[in-house]
Image (cartoon, grey):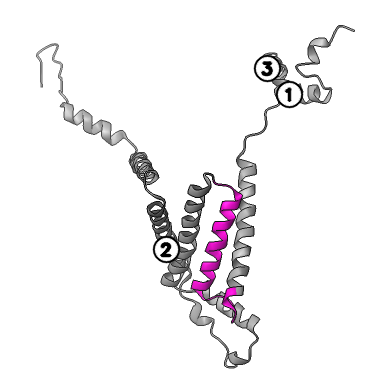
Amino acid sequence: MGDGKQGGTMVEIPKFAGGLMGQSEQNPIAVVQAKFKEVEHKFKGWLAKQSLPVEAAVVTATSAAQGAAIGAFMGTLTGDTSSLITPPPNAAGLNPEAMASLKQAQAFTGGPLVQARNIAVMTGVNAGISCVMRRLRGKEDVQSSMVAAFGSGAIFTLVSGMGGPNQAANALTSGLFFALVQGGIFQLGQKFSQPPVEDVYYAKTRSMLSNLGLQNYEKNFKKGLLNDITLPLLTDR
């Protein structure tokens, strides 16, 4: 509206319009992520107050649901190709190892429902056992991880129908394989997640070199054993 001063024109912007402009400038993805983290934090806080059976059941169910979603998605992408892997006419004459390989291939080539069931069992059992072990032992280490992997591998084998006539032995073998793989992955993760050990004997020397812009020569100092203890002993001679 015109104010009559020097022919100028002023346009008043309502407060609610400014608020809408501020909201529109926010990243919707960041807003969703913030809301998700808030809900996740509240859920974990509530779950930590529950008893062990309740926590284990909730963790198993949620992990199984996530695994089912992943399995269904994988099954949708690959399609149901299990019908292409059919036993030959003389299947009765095949040795147990050949039949076991055939069932293993069928277990990994099912449609969305089959893949959802298999992955849900594997992730749910793994998460449930991990939860129980963490609550009982008070820590999460490689032993707990391997026990959970053993249980998930054995149950996965039984549910998916993999293996030969001796299902118990095959479940045991698969559980051991899952445990070894999980133990190796856990150890690698621990190794690469730990920060490098700080050399306390080079703290002052490193600071001095950084202040002088000579930090590139730190390796030469270490090679010559010039650390915080020996460096002050140097003289002009």
Q: Which mark is residue 68?
A: 2
- Looking at the rendered structure, the kind of residue marked 2 is Ala
Q: Which mark is residue 108?
A: none
Q: Which mark is residue 207?
A: 3
From the image, tell me which residue sits under label 1. 216
Left/right placement of residue 18 relative to residue 212 reads left
- Looking at the rendered structure, the kind of residue marked 3 is Ser
Left/right placement of residue 202 relative to residue 24 reads right
Looking at the rendering, which quadrant does residue 163 occupy? bottom right
- Closer to us: 144 or 122: 144
- Closer to us: 93 or 207: 93
- Looking at the rendered structure, the kind of residue marked 1 is Asn
Q: Residue at x 62, y 38 (%)?
A: 194
Give percent across and percent down for residue 135: 48, 48
Does 95 sit above or below residue 190? below
Front of the two marks 2 and 3: 2
